[in-house]
Image (cartoon, grey):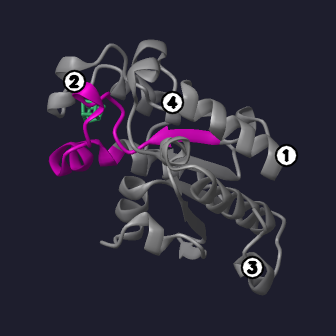
Amino acid sequence: MGTLAELEAEASSCTRCALAAGRTTVVFGVGDPDADLMLVGEGPGRDEDLQGEPFVGRSGQLLDRLLAEELGMPRSRCYIANVVKCRPPANRDPLPQEIAACRPYLEGQLAHIRPRVVLTLGNFSSRLLLQRAEGITRLRGRTYPFRGGVLIPTFHPAAALRGGGQVLAGMRADFVRAKLTLAGASGAKVGAEAAG
Ligand code: SF4
């Protein structure tokens, strides 16, 4: 296995799937390669495609706010990536064959960073990494053992921007769950729902 930088360099000219044709930039991932917390979203949007960094638009601003308010953590202390590294046209959902083609990059990121906690944001990353078919509303609200650490599924920030207070309260509870897990809290505490 090469280094994370070598993997990023390989991805920067990747043409393994059809998303290569429409992208401006490959949005590989950003953050601390030794992070305890890794966040995994769906795919780049317009702002991310132009800037080459995940979660820089309105969703990213909400993500930064939740990290600061619930975990007391700037984004620079986490590692943030997506399931697919290139923008799907018109922000459509990534297709199964695109997710499969891009998966080795995500697997490489997980293998290099080895985070203690993975927060999956939304349906695509949660279903992919948990290998479950249920939607995020059913999956969230608890922790899952994941490769020697813990996986915590939560909503995508875009859903909170669309869905209002209840979705946001759920996200806050999940971020608190991540904080308690990182702090080494007991299973009982980790499983407790925090007030929104
Ligand atoms: S989405 Fe992933 S697999 Fe497809 S071209 Fe981009 S980097 Fe390659």
Rate crowding at label 3 as few (under 14), some (14 to 19) or many (20 or more) other CA atoms within 10 Å. Answer: some
**Residue matched to label 1:** 72
**Residue matched to label 3:** 192
Q: Nearer the viewer, mark 3 or mark 1?
A: 3
Q: Secondary structure at mark 4?
A: loop
Tell me how far mark 4 sits from mark 1, CA to CA: 20 Å
Q: Is the CB of the residue bearing disc 2 within 8 angstroms of ligand 1?
A: yes
Rate crowding at label 4 as few (under 14), some (14 to 19) or many (20 or more) other CA atoms within 10 Å. Answer: many
Residue 54: numbered disc: 4
**Residue matched to label 2:** 20
Which is nearer the N-term, disc 1 or disc 2? Answer: 2
Provide residue 165's location: percent of width, then percent of height. 63, 53
Q: Which amino acid type is shown beneath numbered disc 3? A: Ala
Q: Measured along the vertical axis of the image, is residue 176 above or below residue 12?
A: below
Provide residue 170's location: percent of width, then percent of height. 63, 62
Which quadrant holds the N terminus? Answer: top left
Work out whether residue 157 or residue 12 is closer to the camera in this orientation and state it: 157
Start and end of the magenta stretch?
79-104
Which is nearer the N-term, disc 3 or disc 4? Answer: 4
Tag 1–tag 2 contact (CB < 8 Å): no
Left or right: where 81 falls relative to 25: right
Which of the four quarters of the rendered structure image does ligand 1 lie in?
A: top left
